[in-house]
Amino acid sequence: MDITYRRMYRLKIKGSFSSAHYLKNYQGACENLHGHNWVVEVEVKGKKLNSIGLLIDFKELKKALKKVLSELDHKLLNELPFFKENNPSSELIAYYIFKRLEEELSAFPEVKVSSVTVFETEGASATYYED
Ligand SMILES: [Zn+2]
């Protein structure tokens, strides 16, 4: 029986950035300008390993994440084009990083971004993923 189609691999990496934001139309402290040290956990998946047994080199994955996070680091998120239209909530930050990572990883067709989790604090996170 051929079960190779069921084989999947998942890789996870973590990164972080520091930035300020405020939430529009929110009743509470988060409507005021404040900052977070955001922690970002990224999971990618794929079926096919390369000739040396890697889905993707962690180095490449970290490079892509670092590039995306550097665009957010030490910024007021509300001033970035995407977040002028969309509130910079943890949910939408996760969505944004997911979409940017898909672009950065387009050179690696075997690798699919699986989920992005954004931790606003150690105990509070939001995850974006696509079925
Ligand atoms: Zn906040």
Image: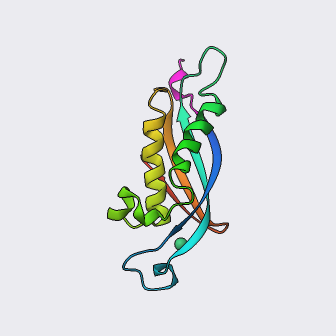
**Residue 5 higher or lower than 23, as above or below:** above
Where residue 34 sits: x, y (%)? 55, 75
Which residue extends farthest bottom? 28
Residue 54 in which image quadrant: top right
**Residue at horizontal 63 percent and vertical 42 percent from the top:** 12
Residue displayed at 49% across by 65% down? 76
Q: Is residue 45 magenta?
A: no
Q: Is residue 3 left or right of residue 130?
A: right
Q: Horizontal and vertical percent for residue 71?
A: 50, 50
Residue drawn where x is 54% and y is 36% of the image: 45
Total tally of numbered discs in the picture: 0
Give the quarter of the figure containing the N terminus.
top right
Q: Give the colour scheme shown.
A: rainbow
**Residue 99 in sight in this render:** yes
Q: Viewed as shown, does residue 18 lie left or right of 93? A: right
Judged left or right of residue 123, residue 130 is left
In this view, the residue farthest toward the left is 85
Q: Position of residue 68 (x, y in %)?
A: 51, 46
Magenta residues, start to end: 1-9
Q: Residue at x 63, y 54 (%)?
A: 16
- Percent across and percent down for residue 56 are 60, 28
Q: Quick check: can you spot residue 3? A: no
Question: In the depicted view, which residue is nearer to us: 58 or 81?
Answer: 81
